[in-house]
Amino acid sequence: MPAKPTSATLFAYQVGFGDCFLLRFTYPGMLRHVLIDFGTTGLPKNTARGHMVRVANDIAARCGGCLDAVVATHRHEDHISGFATTASGDGPGDIIRGLKPKVVVQPWTEDPRLAVDATGPALARRRHALAARTLARMQEVSRHAVSALDADPRGFREVAAQLRFIGEDNIANLSAVKNLAVMGRKHVYVHHESKSGLEDILPGVRTHVLGPPTLRQTDTIARQRDRDPAEFWQLRLRSLVEERELADGAVLFPGSVAAQGGKLPQATRWLADRMKRARAQELLQIVRSLDDAMNNTSVILLFQTTRKKLLFPGDAQIENWAYTLSKAKYRDLLASVDLYKVGHHGSLNATPRSMWARFKKKGKAGTPGRLTSVMSTRPGKHGHEASNTEVPRETLVTELGSESELHSTHLLAEGMLFETVEIPL
């Protein structure tokens, strides 16, 4: 008979606002290790420098110097920044690449072939290539938004912290992206119902790919098109570039007489302030919408053994979930989940109520076979309690603590590198 795992162990690493999970399957006479994401946008307070290197070294030790697979759910900084390398070759990404993972799994949107020779009908190929380029253009908007903030911090004072946090998370992590592209013997770019690439790595484990859907399956994850003058964020990219050029000293009308203006008259200063505030709020809303779009490219994996199901949805939000939840067979499959990696660090819109309501193994403390939930997060980094947008959302944390066995990195004692969650199979 093919080998089957007898237990699983999840190491939930303390990376603050980010995700880093090492999933170990124990077989008779062997271990298999899958690293699911490795990134952060805000380490816990009092965390020593070089923390991500420390995490990478611990991962190397726990997998015995050989990593079987890496899953990078999507390209946000809080999920892939740990894969970044350094010129000296001693960065956390250098360490992970040195573990020679056999397979690297990423969403279909990361496939570098999309721009030239993606498989499928011509129309589908063109649409998928446009969607992939759109992600890059989204990150360009975020880069210019952060540049605008750097150039005029006073003009963004009311939203500066939010704009910087969300904007920087969306900026292309080129070192990490390039490292992931050359890491591993095999690359698999997955979508809803595709093969995971982990079939040979994890015998006796069926790995369902529930998301993201492709554009042929549904276009709910890609409302923005690559070149469409009706898409406002695309127009804003153009204006942001022009603003930066002017700020850098470009001459609008070469050869004409130029004059340096003084301060605005007292009576009109209120209008300038209002315009600055409106511009800041506009940019924040655009960057937020692009952040949602990027989250909706997240890989959603469900690991199924003979007796247990383990769900890892990255940062998938409702637009990504909608396609899977529209199908009865997947609603039924999700109903018996045993371990749930909480989506998007405890954001309320990443745990659909329709899905949570179907989890049959929820229950109060002492319930046999009670659902286990695992969350990696850091309070105070994203959103606000006053607007009910804080992450992690307090109402969700309360529900998770009441109806499941909750393990969260934000509850770890200072200095703890990870929490171990044992899963008998």
Image: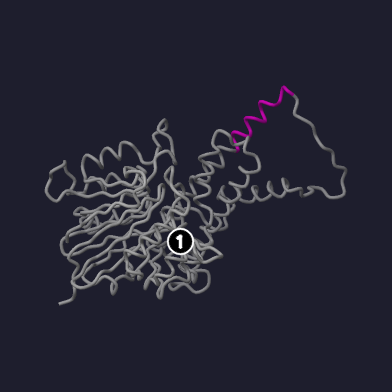
x and y percent of residue 71 in the render?
37, 63
Report x, y in % for residue 330. 25, 58
Count of residue discs: 1
Q: 314 or 242: which is nearer to us? A: 314
Quadrant of image for the N terminus = bottom left
Identify the element where label 1 is drawn.
helix
Q: Is residue 50 above or below residue 410?
A: below
Query: What residue is shown at x 78% (from left), y 47% (from top)?
Result: 252
Q: Which quarter of the figure is the C terminus placed in?
A: bottom left
- Residue bearing the label numbered 1: 92
Main SS of the magenta part reads helix
Q: Quadrant of residue 74?
A: bottom left
Identify the residue at the far bottom of this view.
Answer: 1
* Label 1 Cα crowd, 10 Å radius (few <14 / some 14-19 / many 20+): many
Left or right: 401, with 217 as reference point? left
Q: Type of residue at label 1? A: Pro
Considering only vertical position in the picture, is 77 above or below 103? above
Residue drawn at 40 percent across, 68 percent down: 189
- Residue visible at 40% across and 47% down in the picture: 16
Q: In this view, does 96 lie to the left or right of 333?
A: right
Q: Nearer the viewer, residue 362 or 380?
A: 380
Q: What stretch is highlighted in magenta?
A: 266-279
* Residue 82 % position (x, y): 45, 58
Q: Where is residue 250 in the image (x, y as percent from the top left)?
A: 77, 50
